[in-house]
Amino acid sequence: MAKKKSKDKAGSNTIAMNKQARHEYFIDDEIEAGIELQGWEVKSLRSGKVNIAESYVYVRDGEIFISGMTITPLQAASTHVVANPTRIRKLLMSRKEIDNLIGRVNREGMTLVATTMYWVRSWAKIKVGVAKGKKLHDKRTDSKEKDWNRDKARIMKSSLR
């Protein structure tokens, strides 16, 4: 009989998260996209040297790009390649998904935000969120709600003792 492969993995598949995006935007929808990478970038991703907090996604000539994402090169990476840590990278999606995003950005005034970067088998993927910016009072309301939920959980925990 053939051996069954174990699906339990030791580590998480998440490479990087953009926690600030949830604070700054109302995320309406998330779409998975592949990313075009060079060899040294994949090695750096495997060691977790990536930052997507300052990145933004935009549409140019019917294609989707991500800019501002920093992938720090490894010291032991190839020496004959000049590494540009903040280069513009192309996101890979189907034409139907790209057209849908372009329509939502143009018509509804939405923006595109990178929320999470993770591994799917051996491919690096990015979740692109279709988002609308929050106003200052929305951020305050969210903060108050989060504080109240934390206090409520603390009160419930102490009352159960």
Image (cartoon, helix red, strand yellow):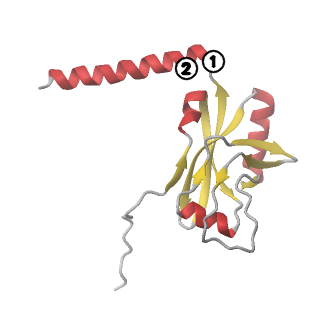
Q: Secondary structure at mark 2?
A: helix
Q: Which mark is residue 135?
A: 1
In the rendered image of this protein, does residue 146 appear above or below residue 120? above
Coordinates of residue 153 in the picture (x, y in percent): 28, 24
Q: How many marks?
A: 2
Coordinates of residue 89 in the picture (x, y in percent): 74, 54
The residue furthest bottom is 1
In the rendered image of this protein, does residue 152 appear above or below residue 129? above
Coordinates of residue 75 in the picture (x, y in percent): 61, 67
Q: CA distance from mark 1 to mark 2?
A: 7 Å
Q: Which mark is residue 139?
A: 2
Q: Which mark is residue 29?
A: none
Side of 65 relative to 46 (left or right): right
The residue furthest top is 137
Q: Nearer the viewer, residue 138 or 87?
A: 87
Side of 71 relative to 5 (left or right): right
Tag 2: amino acid:
Lys
**Residue at 53% across, 57% down:** 48
Quarter containing the C terminus: top left
**Residue at 43% across, 19% down:** 145
Check contact, mark 1 vs mark 2: CB within 8 A: yes
Tag 1: amino acid:
Lys
- Quarter of the rendering containing residue 46: bottom right
Coordinates of residue 1 in the picture (x, y in percent): 34, 86
